[in-house]
């Protein structure tokens, strides 16, 4: 996997990353750090990537189990260390999985498998952060 990150120049703290798959992602800093608040912060993208990684796993596991999953949302909130490097120290993940007649235990199993086995992003942030998981299943009629 590769990525190329380029600074936008002396007028700010904007960076553009080009991923190995050819996609562009902009990042910027807060105004108090010289940024212009034009894009997400790098740590926000790390948190979003962790949420995307685990949501992907959960949907994939449920679909593979032939469950009628219709939606999956993960609300993440993170706390960071007070001193540099300001790593994540606690992350709460609240899953809301919707579908038709989804068994609670199947959804909880999918979330557990993602957390314990499949989500590489989660495994990395778990080196510094305690991860707390909440699961909500909503039946669609």
Image: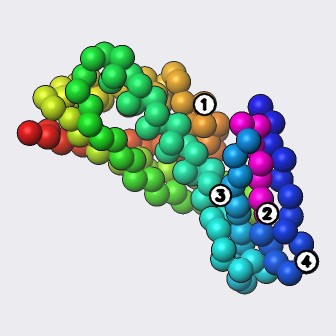
Q: Is residue 57 above or below residue 23?
A: above
Please state the horizontal and vertical placement of residue 52, each as a whole percent of the image: 51, 42
Residue 60 appears in the figure? yes
Q: Which residue is mark 3?
A: 43
Residue range of the region highlighted in magenta in the rendering: 15-21
> Farthest top residue?
65
Please state the horizontal and vertical placement of residue 31, each as a whole percent of the image: 71, 82
Mark 2 nearby-residue class (10 Å; few <14, some 14–19, many ≥20): many
Mark 1–mark 4 distance (CA, rounded to whole Å): 35 Å
Q: Which residue is mark 1?
A: 120
Please name the residue shown 77% across and 59% down the image: 16
Q: Quadrant of the C terminus?
A: top left
Front position in the image: 23 or 69: 23
Give the secondary structure at mark 2.
strand
Mark 1 nearby-residue class (10 Å; few <14, some 14–19, many ≥20): some
Mark 2–mark 1 distance (CA, rounded to whole Å): 25 Å
Mark 2–mark 4 distance (CA, rounded to whole Å): 11 Å
Q: Which residue is mark 4?
A: 10
Mark 4–mark 3 distance (CA, rounded to whole Å): 22 Å
- Tell me which numbered mark, 2 or 3, is placed earlier along the sequence: 2
- Tell me which numbered mark, 2 or 4, is placed earlier along the sequence: 4
Give the secondary structure at mark 4.
loop
Q: How many marks?
A: 4
**Are the two marked residues, 1 and 4, in contact with CB atoms closer than 8 angstroms?**
no
Front position in the image: 80 or 141: 141
């Amino acid at each position: 996997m590769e990525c190329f990150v380029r600074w936008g120049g002396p007028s700010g703290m904007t960076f553009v990353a080009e991923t190995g798959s050819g996609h562009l992602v902009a990042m910027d800093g807060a105004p108090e750090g010289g940024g212009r608040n034009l894009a997400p912060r790098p740590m926000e993208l790390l948190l979003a990537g962790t949420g995307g990684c685990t949501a992907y796993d959960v949907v994939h596991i449920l679909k593979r189990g032939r469950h009628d999953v219709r939606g999956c949302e993960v609300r993440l909130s993170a706390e960071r260390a007070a001193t540099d490097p300001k790593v994540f120290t606690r992350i709460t993940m609240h899953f809301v999985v919707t579908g038709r007649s989804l068994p609670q235990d199947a959804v909880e199993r999918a979330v557990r498998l993602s957390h314990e086995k499949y989500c590489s992003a989660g495994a990395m942030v778990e080196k510094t952060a305690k991860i707390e998981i909440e699961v909500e299943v909503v039946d669609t009629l």
